[in-house]
Image (tube, grey):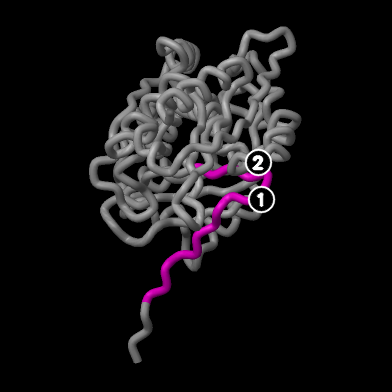
């Protein structure tokens, strides 16, 4: 009797959770999963995360969902770095993929031989701007302090779990430099891509309280006196027909606004009469008004 192969269960972030996605080769995925799922189950248990591996393809998407509060500390080359459970799971999954690649005869001796490894982090549209920083200041700092190499590439042939609108952050170098860079970059991605719990004001307050008080020694987020960055959420009602002018062809105009302002902008579905849509805008305090003005002027 033939049984249809079951697709892996997908876990989506809930209140207080973040999601990360990594690309891995099909030949390496088995080393992450383990016999009868033993390795991935242990990783989930140890990091209190949910980890899924996409269906078989040349490239597979590993999706990680866990809490985003900065409640964990990991050691990277003798340096303690404060992270969230989601980040801890991300780093451990990456480390396991490197080990699995070495076990299968691939890679460049990155685990113990000092060779080069690579980490492929998939992010949604508009997230890269938060990683790059104004004029590339953030990513330059990451590269200088970690000594890893970082490139941003398009996802040309996205496997299940990735999309044409996604972008790929490729981190290469020795295992420790890549880990250091991954921790800092994932912190910026988490700050941006979590979408402030899908734009609810309650989530915004909670996110600021728990996750924005970052250790600025390892990843400078803002130059405020106490190192805390406040995020603000606005909701803007736009005429249904006008939203297309904000979004632009294939979302290019909206992406440009997000990249320029490092904000997260999402439009709701239209109302029953196709009269209005709600734009939820979340961004760092002080530039949110600028973004609202851009959207308002475009709409009207």
Query: Which quadrant is the N terminus positioned in?
Result: bottom left
Query: Which quadrant is the C terminus positioned in?
Result: top left
Residue lying at the far left of the rendered structure = 156
**What residue is at 49 percent from the left and 13 percent from the top?**
145
* Rendering coords of residue 56 (x, y %): 32, 61
Residue 224 found in image quarter: top right
Residue 106 found in image quarter: top left
Residue 185 as seen in the image, left or right of residue 80 = left
* Residue 145 visible in rendering: yes
In this view, 86 is above or below 274: above
* Rendering coords of residue 99 (x, y %): 43, 43
Mark sitting earlier along the chain (2/1):
1
Which label sits on residue 200? 2
**What residue is at 60 percent from the left and 21 percent from the top?**
284
- Under circle 2, the secondary element is loop
Residue 222 is inside the magenta segment: no
Which label sits on residue 175? none
Residue extent of the magenta highlight: 5-20
Residue 248 as seen in the image, left or right of residue 47 = left
**What residue is at 65 percent from the left and 36 percent from the top?**
84
* Residue 117 visible in rendering: no
Front-most of residues 88 and 207: 207
Q: Mark 2 to mark 1: distance in Å?
A: 25 Å
Of discs 2 and 1, which sits in the foreground? 2
**What residue is at 63 percent from the left and 45 percent from the top?**
17
Residue 60 as seen in the image, left or right of residue 215 = left
Residue 18 as seen in the image, left or right of residue 24 = right
Which label sits on residue 48? 1
Front-most of residues 271 and 193: 271
Q: Main secondary structure of the magenta part?
A: loop
Disc 2: CA contacts within 10 A as few (<14), some (14-19) or many (>=20): some
């Amino acid at each position: 009797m033939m049984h249809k192969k079951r697709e892996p269960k997908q876990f989506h972030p809930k209140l207080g959770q973040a999601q990360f996605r990594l690309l891995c080769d099909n030949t390496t995925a088995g080393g992450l999963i383990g016999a009868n799922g033993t390795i991935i189950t242990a990783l989930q248990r140890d990091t209190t995360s949910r980890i899924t591996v996409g269906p078989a393809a040349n490239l597979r998407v590993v999706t990680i969902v866990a809490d985003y509060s900065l409640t964990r500390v990991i050691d990277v080359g003798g340096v303690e770095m404060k992270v969230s459970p989601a980040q801890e799971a991300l780093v451990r999954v990456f480390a396991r993929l490197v080990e699995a690649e070495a076990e299968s005869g691939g890679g460049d001796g990155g685990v113990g031989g000092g060779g080069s490894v690579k980490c492929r982090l998939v992010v949604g549209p508009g997230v890269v701007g938060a990683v790059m920083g104004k004029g590339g200041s953030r990513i330059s700092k990451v590269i200088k302090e970690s000594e890893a190499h970082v490139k941003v590439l398009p996802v040309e042939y996205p496997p299940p779990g990735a999309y044409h609108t996604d972008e790929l952050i490729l981190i290469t170098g020795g295992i420790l430099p890549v880990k250091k860079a991954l921790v800092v970059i994932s912190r910026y991605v988490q700050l941006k891509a979590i979408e402030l719990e899908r734009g609810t004001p309650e989530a915004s307050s909670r996110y600021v309280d728990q996750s924005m008080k970052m250790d600025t020694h390892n990843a400078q987020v803002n130059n405020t006196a106490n190192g805390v960055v406040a995020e603000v959420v606005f909701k803007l009602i736009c005429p249904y027909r006008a939203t297309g002018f904000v979004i632009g062809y294939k979302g290019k105009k909206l992406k440009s606004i997000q990249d320029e302002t490092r904000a997260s902008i999402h439009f709701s579905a239209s109302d029953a009469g196709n009269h209005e849509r709600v734009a939820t805008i979340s961004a760092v305090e002080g530039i949110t008004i600028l973004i609202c003005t851009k959207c308002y002027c475009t709409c009207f």
